[in-house]
């Protein structure tokens, strides 16, 4: 990697774009980050060029650059993890309650 530009792995960027599909932006438009990324014109292969996606990430992050994107993703993924953990706890609580109420039939 040189100091002049960022080397980007296109596969990693595409994977990140797919991972972001469900994350809505905070502008109130309801558009997901993936929807915003897809505004860049696709190449013949059907995928936006890695440079365009990286540039889009930079614009989305504003002055924070990729560090801002990482912070935003970490925060959102942390919330998703908390929600998942709470859902598992709720399921386990219901399962325990059903076992107490119905024995091994639950």
Image: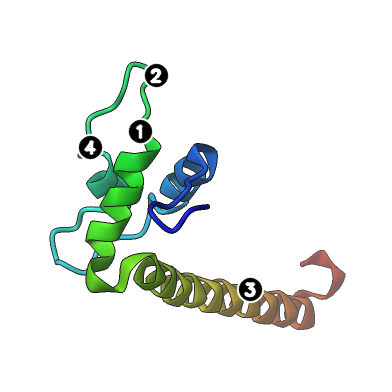
Circle nearer the viewer, 2 or 3: 2
Disc 3 residue crowd, few under 14, some 14–19, many 20+, Cα 10 Å: few
Residue 24: x, y in percent?
A: 29, 60
- Residue at figure coordinates x 35%, y 33% from the top left: 49
Task: State the SS at label 1.
Answer: loop
According to the picture, the residue beneath numbered tag 2 turns out to be 45
Which residue is the extreme one toward the front? 3
According to the picture, the residue beneath numbered tag 1 turns out to be 49
- Residue at figure coordinates x 41%, y 54% from the top left: 20
According to the picture, the residue beneath numbered tag 4 turns out to be 40
Residue 75: x, y in percent?
A: 43, 77
Circle nearer the viewer, 1 or 3: 1
Residue 36: x, y in percent?
A: 23, 48
Colour convention:
rainbow
In the image, 106: left or right of 79?
right
Circle nearer the viewer, 3 or 4: 4
CB within 8 Å, label 1 to label 3: no
Task: State the SS at label 4.
Answer: loop
Task: State the SS at label 3.
Answer: helix
Displayed quadrant of residue 105: bottom right
According to the picture, the residue beneath numbered tag 3 turns out to be 88
Disc 2 residue crowd, few under 14, some 14–19, many 20+, Cα 10 Å: few
């Amino acid at each position: 990697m040189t100091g002049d530009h960022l080397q980007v792995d296109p596969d990693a960027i595409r994977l990140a774009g797919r991972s972001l599909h469900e994350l809505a932006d905070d502008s109130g438009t309801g558009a997901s980050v993936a929807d915003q990324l897809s505004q860049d014109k696709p190449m013949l292969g059907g995928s936006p060029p890695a440079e365009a996606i990286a540039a889009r990430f930079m614009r989305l992050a504003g002055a924070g650059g990729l560090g801002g994107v990482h912070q935003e993703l970490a925060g959102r993924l942390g919330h998703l993890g908390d929600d998942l953990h709470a859902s598992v706890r709720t399921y386990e609580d219901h399962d325990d309650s059903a076992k107490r109420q119905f024995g091994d039939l639950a």
